[in-house]
Image (cartoon, grey):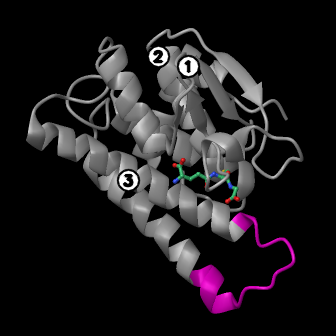
Amino acid sequence: MKLLGHDNSPYVRKVRIVLEEKRIPYEYVETKGSQPGSPVPEYNPLSKIPVLLTDKGKGIYDSPVIVEYLEALVPEPQLIPADLEQRTDVRRWEALGDGVTDATVAASHDYDKVQSAEWHQKQRLKIDRGLAAMAKELGEREFCYGSRFSLADIAAGYAMGYIDRMLPDIDWRTPHPNLARLAERLAKRESFIKSMPKA
Ligand SMILES: N[C@@H](CCC(=O)N[C@@H](CS)C(=O)NCC(=O)O)C(=O)O
């Protein structure tokens, strides 16, 4: 199994955390869809990373589909509950983490400042509201969902990590000390340490 991706991509990090948690051996092929000669467009017509290449040569995208595939392939440790209600709650956490990350990608990649102040404000609002929703749902519990580590914690963790990296001026720890404590706990996990971008 191969993972086509790059350290810069938060969605790739999400998949790497899942692979590490489940201890699934994989070859990490560092590439971007835009690189000349990259294998990404061959397997994902949208030319986006991550792409998971199965041993049969099938390319799987995007990250929620990859995560669902890995969960079914290696059920332990369970990251997504089987029960429909619980499963939906955890997948909603994933959507929240992805959405906050989408807004962070959008805002931080506007290098030439072509977007208006209103547009940036809109992205910032998504990030702030998303974090507030995470903080409210987490409350004083140890884990984002239920009584054990799940995809919900991965979603919150990779989203908070990406904000720190790309938009470090956002101080989300002061208004949300419970998220700050969660981030501290998650940062100690082997899967988070191993998937940490190099620079
Ligand atoms: N929803 C997708 C997002 C993937 C994505 O946007 N990847 C970015 C890297 S962070 C990418 O490859 N962008 C290249 C492009 O859009 O052409 C997922 O979760 O996999």
**Element carrying mark 3:** helix
On-image quarter of the N terminus: top right
Q: How far is mark 3 from mark 1, CA to CA?
A: 20 Å
Would residue 31 be found to the left or right of residue 13 on screen? Answer: right
Label 3 vs label 2: CA separation? 20 Å
- Judged from the image, the secondary structure of the residue bearing numbered disc 1 is helix
Q: In the rendering, which numbered label is found on residue 191?
A: 1
Residue at horizontal 61 percent and vertical 91 percent from the top: 118
**Mark 1 and mark 2: Cα distance apart in space:** 6 Å
Above or below residue 121? Residue 105 is above
Residue position for label 3:
95
Q: How many residues crowd around disc 2 within 10 Å: few (fewer than 14), some, or many (20 or more)?
A: some
> Nearest the camera: 47 or 12?
47
Q: Are marks 3 and 1 in contact (CB under 8 Å)?
A: no
Which quadrant of the rendered structure holds the C terminus? top right
* Residues at discs 1 and 2 in contact (Cβ within 8 Å): yes
Task: Give the answer, above or below, for where 196 lies relative to 88.
Answer: above
Left or right of residue 108: residue 88: left
